[in-house]
Image (cartoon, rainbow, N blue to C red):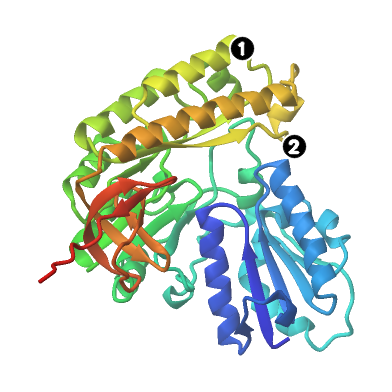
Amino acid sequence: MGRFLIHNFGCRASQADGASLAGSLARTGLRPTSDIHHADLVILNTCTVTSAADQEVRQVVRRVHRQNPDARILVTGCYAQRSPAELAALPGVRWVVGNTHKARIPEILGEEAAKIPFHGQIHVGDIFGLHEFVAAPVEETAGDRTRPNLKIQDGCNNRCSFCIIPSVRGMSRSMPMDRVIDEVGALALRYREIVLSGINLGRWGRDLEGRPRLVVLVDRLLKETEVGRLRLSSVEPLDLSDELLGIIAESRRIARFVHAPLQSGSDAVLRRMRRRYRARHYADRIRKARRLMPEAAIGADVMVGFPGETDAEFEESRRFIEIMPYTYLHVFTYSERPGTPAAALAEPVPMPVRKQRNQVLRELAARKNLEFRERFVGRRLPVVTLADGALSDNYIRVELAVPRPANRLVDVEVEAITAAGLRERSPMTVIG
């Protein structure tokens, strides 16, 4: 097995896991490839948050096996943890490795390399038996990304009725503070923007001695590292303390970016979801963020079609979203997850209704995003350059008029909006 290819599905935490795994495999002598036909080993790092995510994984497994029958396929991640036997039965799958054993993949491959080929070996343990954060060395974290995701928290102690993630990620576990500072410090030598990610990032530190809060960590990172720009990924609304919002607003080294999962703007639906807040609590945090940061990106995850969601409840949620100062939304159609309390609820919403509601919110989100982007025409924005353009600190894609190397922090003058972002003004040509 000389060459490997890793295909990551799902959230930022999964992307970080995949980058870490790529570094671990490279240190064993394997070489990465992006060509499926040249891969001796294909690793699928899976998501299982919806049935559509599961279906996509199965389709990719079959496609990989069809395109390269000789490749050995290893399936890992959340779907592997939830339903290993289902994946082990798919054609070409040699290993299924759950999240409990993901850090041992190089060892598992080494142990089995000399054995006679066989089909579908399963390495999955008790996810709730994991009590410590498994931290990857810093050189494994970034992969080839311009904006590396550093996962500093894993697992979740919440028990939302629709969510399978605690069952496949386990209880909340945090990377120790000093280790985070070391990791960010090392990454800051190579990368201008670093994204802190986690399954429930706002709960970082609650399992550590002294129960430090995320804002304390952020403050130390600003003081003790040379990070050019720090971006916090999704933070639950009740973890958006005044102190955390304040430090985001005050520091030019933190991206003006707040992503707070909403799920629904209807209190009745939130109760059935077993979410810990109500619409008024959520609105208080978002309005506070907007007052402190008038030009920040503010986004949310929203779910439609939760069991029992009536037309009136959906309309209540839509109106709430309408009045909130969102600049983008991630809209999800409810998907039954076996083993979750919501899957047993009566009154499922018909799928055509779920899809129609999804479309309504996507159109609303598109309008809000367009209105937000229009505000910056003729203005200057701080961006980080990417391999294919740039990203503003307030989360807008920018087409560059002047090519620049990736991984730079620069200011650009905006000329116009594009279909999905903004375009930099071209430099004026002086004649004569």
Q: Position of residue 7 (x, y in %)?
A: 64, 65
Q: Secondary structure at mark 1?
A: helix
Q: Position of residue 153 (x, y in %)?
A: 46, 54
Identify the residue at the far left of this view.
432
Q: Amino acid at mark 1?
A: Asp
| Residue 94 seen in this snapshot | no
Q: Residues within 10 Å of mark 2 (few under 14, many from 20)?
A: some
Q: Quadrant of residue 225?
A: bottom left
Tell me the residue that label 1 is attached to: 311
Q: Secondary structure at mark 2?
A: loop
Q: Amino acid at mark 2?
A: Gly
Residue depicted at x 38% and y 58%:
195
**Vertical position of residue 232 compared to residue 243: above or below:** below
Residue depicted at x 61% and y 51%:
169
Numbered label attached to residue 339:
2
- Indicate which disc, 1 or 2, sits on the residue closer to the N terminus: 1
Residue depicted at x 21% and y 43%:
249
**How far, Cα to Cα, is label 1 from label 2?**
27 Å
**Left or right: 315, with 374 as reference point:** right
Q: Position of residue 103 (x, y in %)?
A: 61, 70
| Residue 8 seen in this snapshot | yes
